[in-house]
Amino acid sequence: MTDRRTQLAENLAGVEERISAACAAAGRKREDVTLIVVTKTYPASDVRILHGLGVRHVAENRDQDAAPKAAACADLDLTWHFVGQLQTNKVRSVVGYADVVQSVDRLKLVSSLSAAAENAGREVGCLVQVALDAESDQRGARGGVGPDGVEELAAAVEAAPGLRFDGLMTVAPLAGPYEGRPRAAFDRLMDLSTALRATRPAANMVSAGMSADLEEAVAAGATHVRIGSAVLGDRPRLG
């Protein structure tokens, strides 16, 4: 465990240096960017170590892994983010632990999340996942709705009991006009965020950037970066 703590501490310090340098280059304050460590496929013991190292935001993308891990870490002051494609039959479970669902991409999911949140007596933050590889208001290859569908989903989340519209999320596309152009993709996301915030100033969360492209995301203005392998490394994974 000591070796693992040392490894995670070193990796985390390296990521912190990268974020700080990116913020300095962009003329931004370090505190303006929140690090979310994506702990998917890694054990609850890693989450506990990360918490001890100061991490307070963690993310998961599969409910079958996330639910038991969140339960095992229920005593820790953590904010749990769900970032994977979410099927409606998993919504009730996800709402039990997730503070923020970053992958809202269709109206049916909004309705399901609202019903589950109301039933659980919780308020769940929601980000509309934007697919910059999608045509019109269709869904993207890795989930998300095309830019034309963002406004409709944002309005639906705002109107839904138990939900709070927090902003937008994207993943750098692997195809389409933004393939290989993460900075351009993140700039486009920021344009969409700026338009939404004209009438929804509180929805100022912009989740973008992962281990390979966090600098581009910070330069574009992301408020949250989702980092997995750069922190967790190549440790053998679960299941």
Image (spheres, rainbow, N blue to C red):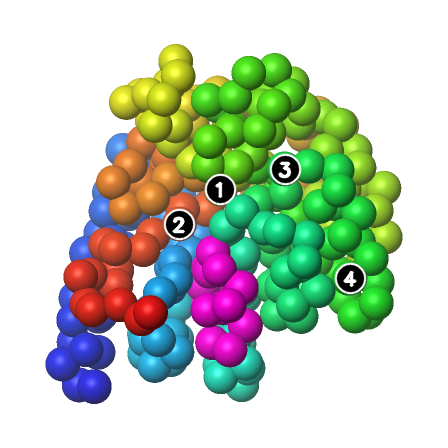
Front-most of residues 160 and 12: 160
- Neighbor class of circle 2 (other Cα within 10 Å; few <14, some 14-19, many 20+) is many
Q: Secondary structure at mark 2?
A: strand
Look at the numbered discs 1 and 3 and tell me whether their residues touch, using CB distance below 8 Å: no
CB-based contact (under 8 Å), mark 2 and mark 1? yes
Q: What SS does tag 3 mark? A: loop
Residue underneath mark 4: 116
**Residue 84 lies within the magenta run:** no
* Type of the residue with mark 2: Arg
* Mark number displayed over residue 226: 2
On the image, the x and y values in percent for residue 146 come to 58, 23
| Mark 4: secondary structure | helix
For discs 1 and 3, the disc positioned in front in the rendered view: 3
Q: Residue at x 77, y 62 (%)?
A: 117
Q: Quadrant of the C terminus?
A: bottom left
Q: Which residues are magenta?
A: 56-69
Badge 3 is on which residue? 105
**Pointer 2 or 3: first along the chain:** 3
The kind of residue on which mark 1 rests is Ser
Residue at 39%, 78% (x, y): give it: 44
